[in-house]
Image (cartoon, rainbow, N blue to C red):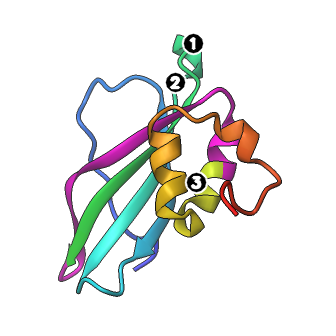
Amino acid sequence: MTKKSFDLKLPEGLPGEYKVHDVLLCPAINDARVLTMIHDMSADGMGHIVRVYMSRQEKDDFVFDFELEAFVFPSHESAVSFANRLPSLTALELLMVQNGYDYELMEGNPRILQ
């Protein structure tokens, strides 16, 4: 199943536009998937949000269990760059970003910590 072959149902009335960025497999957990979405909130002055959802596949359907985290970025480019890099972030890098470390400072560096 690809990110374009499932129907995503979001709560009605959510502002902005959503775009599925990627669906990642979790090989250590059977049928577990991580969905990343880019949520465009720029019209409200909130920038772009990378939303990360825990999901699983049941037969031909994706079941969305809960949102793992939401990361706010000032531009679409920085949100996409972060979402692309998310699967390869170390646990320490992810903790730093979750606690306010400026992701823009990470650009161009393969790792925050050496």
The secondary structure type at the circle numbered 1 is loop
The secondary structure type at the circle numbered 3 is helix
Closest to the camera, between mark 3 and mark 2, is 3
| First reached walking from the N terminus: tag 3 or tag 2 | 2
Q: Is residue 26 left or right of residue 4?
A: left
Q: Nearer the viewer, residue 104 or 55?
A: 104
Residue 87: x and y, percent? Answer: 53, 67
> Badge 2 is on which residue?
41
User: Could you tell me how far apart the alpha carbons at marks 3 and 2 are, in whole angstroms?
Assistant: 16 Å
Question: CB under 8 Å between callouts 1 and 2?
Answer: yes
* Callout 2 amino acid: Met
Residue name at image x 49 percent, y 52 percent: 94
Residue 74: x and y, percent? Answer: 65, 26
Q: Which label sits on residue 45? A: 1
- Whether residue 106 is visible: yes
Residue 85: x and y, percent? Answer: 63, 60
